[in-house]
Each structure stands twice: as structure tokens, then as C-alpha cells.
Amino acid sequence: MYELVRLARSGLTRHTLEERGFCGFVRFDELTKHAVPGEAGVCVVLRLAAAFPAFLSHSSAGHLAKRV
């Protein structure tokens, strides 16, 4: 949780990201698998809410099969 607080206080905003060359901001609920760039790069999830996020106690994603 300390890391979240440190990042929140660092001034990392959409404006500073745009100044550093980030572009193509899309709302998470509007993102589709076709909208994700295929080339190498860095993706940032920018959360605008000031409150800490809530997490599920158990993942609803299921489990991956163990592959060797």
C-alpha cells in the first residue's frame, strides 16, 4: 500500500504523462482486445479516483493449467 501512496503523491497525472509522450488514452471499460497495440511499448493504467481500490477476495478468472 505504501507504493500506491508514493505514486499518488509523485504527481503522476494524465497531463504529466502526455508531456512525457504518452498518448491514446482510452477508458478501461471501453478497451477491447482489438484496441491494445500489438507492438512493443509501455501501457499505463491511470486511476483518477483518490480512494484506495477494492479487490475481490478470490479471483473470478479461474486457474491456468500447469504446463511443462
Image (tube, rainbow, N blue to C red):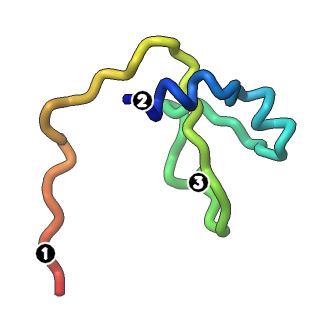
The secondary element bearing badge 2 is classed as helix
Foreground tag (1 vs 3): 1
- Given the image, on which type of amino acid does mark 2 rest? Tyr
Distance CA(mark 2)–CA(mark 3): 30 Å
Q: Is 22 left, or right, of 47 in this rendering?
A: right
Distance CA(mark 1)–CA(mark 3): 27 Å
Quadrant in the picture for the N terminus: top left
The secondary element bearing badge 3 is classed as loop
Residue 8 in the image: above or below residue 42: above
Residue at point 57%, 31% (across, down): 7
Q: Which residue is mark 1?
A: 66
Q: Is 38 left, or right, of 21 in this rendering?
A: left
Give the x, y percent position of residue 36.
59, 54
Quadrant in the picture for the C terminus: bottom left
Which of the pair 38/40 is nearer the observer?
40
Sequence-earlier tag: 2 or 3: 2
Give the x, y percent position of residue 20.
83, 43
Residue 32 in the image: above or below residue 12: below
Among the 4 quarters of the image, the one containing residue 64: bottom left
Foreground tag (2 vs 3): 2
- Given the image, on which type of amino acid does mark 3 rest? Val
- Given the image, on which type of amino acid does mark 1 rest? Lys
Residue at point 83%, 46% (across, down): 21
Q: Is 17 left, or right, of 32 in this rendering?
A: right
Task: Count residues near mark 3 (Cα–Cα under 10 Å), then give few for <14, some for 14-19, many for 20+.
Answer: few
Q: Which residue is mark 2?
A: 2
Which of the pair 38/47 is nearer the observer?
47
Q: Which residue is mark 3?
A: 36
Task: Count residues near mark 1 (Cα–Cα under 10 Å), then give few for <14, some for 14-19, many for 20+.
Answer: few
